[in-house]
Image: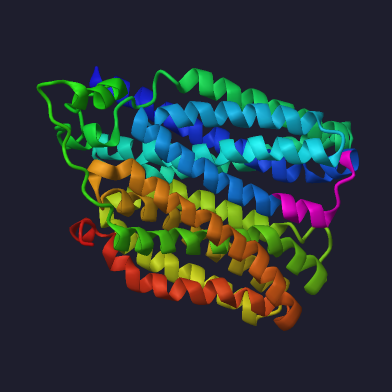
């Protein structure tokens, strides 16, 4: 019975990750159609994306508050519904002001789900007693690829009608997942789940109601346990790893096609292959990640994959060849694909009684990393050229190798 409930919850959490990836990928691939409809220019798009990163961070903080008051399933549902509303508003916007307002709603929902989906993921991983985070992130990556393919297919309707249709499809997906998974997500608070007894497979771990976790301290017979301080050193350490992973991801996502087409002179057919190779490697790494972690442990998986990613980006930065660049982007995907779920898994064990708080704080680092990867690489390219600019994420990966031993369970609770 309990194993069936765990499977249902795992499907629900995986669907949450998938809805997140599908919605975001739909928005970024719909930008050409949105430009045609609203008249927004590239400069304003950059401003909106920057604003979106800031608002997503605000949404992440909001998710922490909601999870602390009720449970992490609440910001999952609220965030997905906010995304659905935002996607409909984006599809309906015919000028820049309403488009910006629509992005505000969508970005807040995006940040909520960013944080709360990871809260659910690490809680479920702890409950069942084996590594599952990489496969959850694989759901996000696979859904993002599906969204890009859907956008490509719908483009046959025309750039603008195709984009609008894709946005409405993504809105239906987000709302549908929110309504479908709300009863299957973990209900308990982080402290209740962390303190609940469980066996190797988590079969005996009870699901504690979120309301019980909130109301218990008000009982005259139960004293509220003291909240220990957050492990700030550990948060900064693993947060830096999340930031580095997003620097790599944002740099490749934002600039790989531009580099291949504008700098290396490839055709419009070849230029997207760098990003395709990267995303394909990310997906493969995440699908293989959990079995590898179960066999070898987090540290032994993180070390070679991070090293491979660094090598790949050094190749991109130092060898001005289309074939070398595409291969280098694929190698970068191997490291980025594994580093993110491993960092969240390790960070979640810093303070099991405050797991949701830790995950929400760690999640904030992804926005900083994304901005560095997208903005700093672009600015630096004006000075060094775009190829050498890819050495920045390569160099940032090197200190990550020194942190890898801390990914092992024996080191996690030291602060």
> Where does the image place residue 74, in percent across and percent down from the top left?
43, 27
**Residue furthest left in the image:** 221
Closest to the observer: 191 or 311? Answer: 191
Quadrant position of the C terminus in the picture: bottom left
Find the magenta span and give its range: 38-48
Closest to the observer: 116 or 66? Answer: 66
* Residue 216 in view, yes or no: yes
Q: Quadrant of residue 221?
A: top left
Residue lying at 39% horizontally and 25% vertically, measured from the top left: 185
Q: Is 181 displayed left or right of 162 in the figure?
A: left
Residue lying at 66% horizontally and 70% vertically, measured from the top left: 377
Residue lying at 74% horizontally and 56% vertically, measured from the top left: 46
> Where does the image place residue 385, in percent across and percent down from the top left?
73, 79
Q: Is residue 84 above or below residue 141?
A: above
Numbered marks: total: 0
Q: Is 244 displayed left or right of 230 in the figure?
A: right
Closest to the observer: 13 or 207? Answer: 207
Q: Is residue 240 magenta?
A: no
> Where does the image place residue 140, in percent across and percent down from the top left?
53, 41
Q: Is residue 383 above or below residue 355?
A: below
Residue lying at 26% horizontally and 50% vertically, measured from the top left: 349
Q: Is residue 47 magenta?
A: yes
> Where does the image place residue 1, in percent across and percent down from the top left?
24, 17
Task: Look at the image and name its color scheme.
Answer: rainbow
Q: Mostly what secondary structure, the magenta segment?
A: helix
Q: Quadrant of residue 346?
A: bottom left
Q: Is residue 3 above or below residue 163?
A: above
Q: Quadrant of residue 222?
A: top left
* Residue 146 in view, yes or no: no
Q: Is 225 displayed left or right of 286 in the figure?
A: left
């Amino acid at each position: 019975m309990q194993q069936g409930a765990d499977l249902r919850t795992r499907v629900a959490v995986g669907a949450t990750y998938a809805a997140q990836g599908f919605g975001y990928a739909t928005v970024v691939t719909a930008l050409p159609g949105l430009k045609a409809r609203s008249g927004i220019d590239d400069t304003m798009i950059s401003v909106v994306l920057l604003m979106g990163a800031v608002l997503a961070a605000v949404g992440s903080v909001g998710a922490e508050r909601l999870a602390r008051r009720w449970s992490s399933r609440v910001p999952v549902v609220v965030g997905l519904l906010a995304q659905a509303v935002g996607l409909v508003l984006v599809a309906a916007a015919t000028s820049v002001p309403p488009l910006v307002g629509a992005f505000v709603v969508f970005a807040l929902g995006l940040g909520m789900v960013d944080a709360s989906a990871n809260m659910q993921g690490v809680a479920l991983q702890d409950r069942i007693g084996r590594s599952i985070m990489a496969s959850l992130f694989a759901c996000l990556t696979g859904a993002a690829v599906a969204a890009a393919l859907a956008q490509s297919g719908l483009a046959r309707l025309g750039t603008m009608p195709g984009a609008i249709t894709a946005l409405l499809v993504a809105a239906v997906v987000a709302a549908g997942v929110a309504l479908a998974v709300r009863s299957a997500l973990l209900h308990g608070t982080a402290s209740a789940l962390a303190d609940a007894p469980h066996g190797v497979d988590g079969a005996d771990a009870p699901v504690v109601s979120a309301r019980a976790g909130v109301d218990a301290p008000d009982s005259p017979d139960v004293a509220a346990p003291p909240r220990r301080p957050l492990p700030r050193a550990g948060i900064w350490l693993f947060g830096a790893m999340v930031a580095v992973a997003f620097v790599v991801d944002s740099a490749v996502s934002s600039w790989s096609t531009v580099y291949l087409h504008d700098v290396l002179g490839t055709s419009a057919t070849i230029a997207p292959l760098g990003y395709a190779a990267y995303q394909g490697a990310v997906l493969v790494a995440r699908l293989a990640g959990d079995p590898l972690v179960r066999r070898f442990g987090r540290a032994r998986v993180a070390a070679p994959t991070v090293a491979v990613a660094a090598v790949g980006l050094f190749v991109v930065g130092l060898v001005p060849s289309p074939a070398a660049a595409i291969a280098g982007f694929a190698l970068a995907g191997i490291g980025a694909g594994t580093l993110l779920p491993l960092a969240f898994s390790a960070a979640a064990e810093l303070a099991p009684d405050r797991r949701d708080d830790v995950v929400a704080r760690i999640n904030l680092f992804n926005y900083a990393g994304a901005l560095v990867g997208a903005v700093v690489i672009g600015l630096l390219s004006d000075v060094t050229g775009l190829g050498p600019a890819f050495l920045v994420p390569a160099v940032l990966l090197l200190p990550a190798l020194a942190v890898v031993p801390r990914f092992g369970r024996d080191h996690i609770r030291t602060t």
